[in-house]
Amino acid sequence: MADIVNVRSATAADAAVVARLQQDMARELGTAGEPGFVDRFAKTWLADLERRPTWLAERDGRAIGVLILVVIDKLPWPGQAPGRWAHVSLVFVDQADRNAGVGHLLLGEMLAWAAANRVDRVQLNANPNSARLYRKAGFDSAPARLMELRI
């Protein structure tokens, strides 16, 4: 069937594809293009790929969506087992493929991976247009004590 979406873990060989999807999202948000961005992104992503598990959604062999996770290992604490948490740094689905369950498939693969890899908390910054997707996947608002300072 031509409309089947496959979700798989991205590998080093996918660096340019992941960079293109990141660039597509930036353009959609109104950011101007940047010469050399794909190479700059690929180099940075590859340098820390172990801590940045990434999933690609593909239809007919073409990447139509991406999810990038950043994994942080907690420092040891007396009397507690080591833990990890993660931040979803990017979820993007091509506009033509939205509202067809692609984001849900990407989140499902990421959450299964997180459960199997000792991740005890996943956080993200929800765009108002995608908050419903995240709530359906089980995400909720952060505790009131979570604070942020932008520099």
Image (cartoon, grey):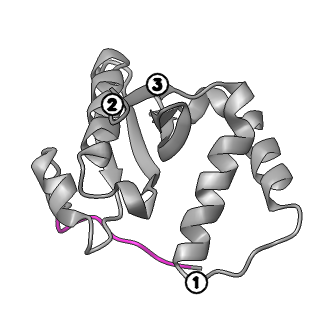
Looking at the image, do the residues carrying marks 1 and 3 touch, with CB atoms under 8 Å apart? Answer: no
**Residue at (47%, 35%) from the top-left corner?**
58
Residue 143: image x %, image y %?
Answer: 17, 61
Image disc number at residue 21: none
Q: Amino acid at mark 3?
A: Arg
- CA gap between label 1 and label 3 equals 29 Å
Residue in view at x 74 percent, y 43 percent: 16
The secondary structure type at the circle numbered 1 is: loop
Q: Quadrant of residue 30?
A: bottom right
- Which is nearer the eye, 26 or 101? 101
Q: Label 1: how many residues lie within 10 Å, few (<14), some (14-19) or many (20+)? A: few
**Which range is magenta?**
143-150
Q: Position of residue 110 (x, y in %)?
A: 35, 32
Q: Quadrant of the C terminus?
A: bottom right
**Residue at image location 17% in from the left, 68% down from the top:** 144
According to the picture, the residue beneath numbered tag 2 turns out to be 4
The amino acid at mark 2 is Ile
Q: Left or right? Give the position of 141 relative to 62.
A: left
Looking at the rendered structure, the kind of residue marked 1 is: Gly
Residue 8 bears which disc, if any?
3
Residue identified by numbered label 1? 30
- Secondary element at image label 3: strand
Tell me the crowding category of disc 3: few under 14, some 14 to 19, or many 20 or more residues within 10 angstroms, Cα based. Answer: some
Considering the numbered disc 2 on the image, is that residue within a helix, a strand or a loop? loop
Q: Is residue 28 magenta?
A: no
Nearer to us in this view, 5 or 41? 5
